[in-house]
Amino acid sequence: MNKTRTLNKGEKIIITQGEYSDFGIVAFAICLKDFSPDDILREYLTIHPDQAKEYEFDETAFVRFLLIEKKVIEETSNMFEWHLGSYRNPSFYITKTKHISGEPKE
């Protein structure tokens, strides 16, 4: 694990995963309290030790954990995805963002 700085209440963060062609955005969020990303990831992996193995980490489940633990809240209000196409084919579309939790936001 790389040592990271503390995330502070009110900061907006983009949670990402992957590298190269596998890179993607998992969630947009706002921190609800100060916390150490290292500590919260360690806590999550203590509960889910099977996800500490390579290719086993479930990013979506981890973000749900952050939401349940009230560390972050999703920030999707007034956001739209601007998709620039696939396979280098410029087939643009713009759509409302979805929530990682799969539940409608209150």
Image (cartoon, grey):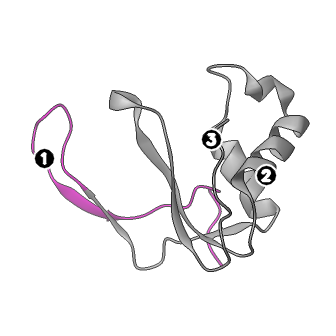
Q: Is residue 99 magenta?
A: yes
Q: Position of residue 61 (x, y in %)?
A: 70, 44
Q: Nearer the viewer, mark 1 or mark 2?
A: 2
Specify whether residue 49 is painted magenta.
Answer: no
Quadrant occupied by the C terminus: bottom right
Type of residue at label 3? Glu
Q: Which residues are magenta?
A: 83-106
Residue furthest left in the image: 90
Residue 5 falls in image quadrant: bottom right
Picture residue at 49% right of the left edge, 71% below the top: 76
Image vertical order of residue 37 relative to residue 49, above or below = below
Q: Residue furthest top?
A: 54
- Of 56 and 92, nearer the camera is 56
- Pinpoint residue 78: horizontal percent, then vertical percent: 40, 79
Q: Nearer the viewer, residue 46 or 82?
A: 46
Label ID, residue 40: 2
* Mark 1 / mark 2, whichever is N-terminal: 2
Q: Which mark is residue 60?
A: none
3D distance between C-alphas at marks 1 and 2: 39 Å
Is the stretch drawn in magenta largely helix, strand or loop?
A: loop
> Seen in the image, is 100 located left or right of residue 81?
right
Residue type highlighted by circle 2: Ile
Q: Position of residue 2 (x, y in %)?
A: 63, 39
Number of marks in the image? 3
Q: Nearer the viewer, mark 3 or mark 2?
A: 2
- Residue under label 3, please give it: 59
What residue sits 42% from the left and 64% below the top? Answer: 97
Tag 1 residue: 91
